[in-house]
Amino acid sequence: MGIIAVDLFITLDGVYQGPGGPDEDREGGFEFGGWQGAYFDHQSGESIGAGIDRLQALLLGRKTYDIFAAFWPKAGAEDPIASKFNEVPKFVASRTLTDPTWAGTTVLTDVATEVAALRDRFDEIHVIGSGHLAKTLLNEHLVDR
């Protein structure tokens, strides 16, 4: 049986919104997008890279999926993160998405049942960002790491 690992960039006071860039997620008037960049170093880069190397599938919430689907397919095959994210199966938890645009994406509408079944298919499934989904998975006891 595989594991579900949640990868969050989160501050000590619980902020996980918009770590990547100033315009990544301005919902609710959030003005601090890109906050994570100041804390990125060689050691964190190695840790993040090792996690990406291990993942066999991505499990994303709808908001993170939309951000990733707009960026990673266009990033180019020479980018090792883009290459990995574009090649692995992707699963998005959504009640409203019906026609995902990112190749290799499957929509999950019954998170508890469908996510539990993913463990039988993959050794390591990573949730990146997706704070609302992470909370749901924690409540359902579906997070292993």
Image (cartoon, rainbow, N blue to C red):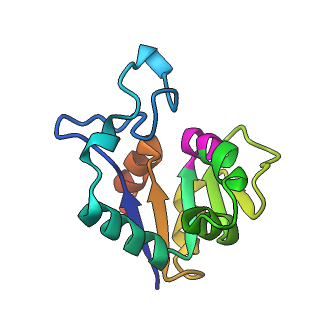
Residue appearing at x 77%, y 49% in the figure: 100
Query: Quarter of the image holding residue 32?
Result: top left
Q: Which residues are magenta?
A: 61-67
Residue 82 visible to an observer of this rendering:
yes
Judge whether residue 34 is colored magenta.
no
| Residue at the outermost top position | 29
Judge whether residue 66 is colored magenta.
yes
Q: Position of residue 108 (x, y in %)?
A: 66, 55
Relative height, residue 61 to residue 17 (above, below): below
| Residue at the outermost right position | 99
Relative height, residue 25 to residue 133 (above, below): above
Closest to the observer: 107 or 63? 63
**Number of numbered discs visible in the structure rendering:** 0
Query: Quarter of the image holding residue 90?
Result: bottom right
Relative height, residue 23 to residue 58 (above, below): above
Residue appearing at x 82%, y 46% in the figure: 99
Residue 145 visible to an observer of this rendering:
no
Q: Position of residue 136 (x, y in %)?
A: 43, 48
Residue appearing at x 32%, y 35% in the figure: 35
Q: Is residue 48 left or right of residue 118?
A: left
Q: Is residue 88 left or right of residue 26?
A: right
Residue appearing at x 64%, y 59% in the figure: 91
Q: Main secondary structure of the magenta part?
A: helix
Q: Position of residue 112 (x, y in %)?
A: 52, 58
Q: Is residue 20 left or right of residue 44?
A: right
Q: Quadrant of the C terminus?
A: bottom left
Closest to the observer: 45 or 4? 45
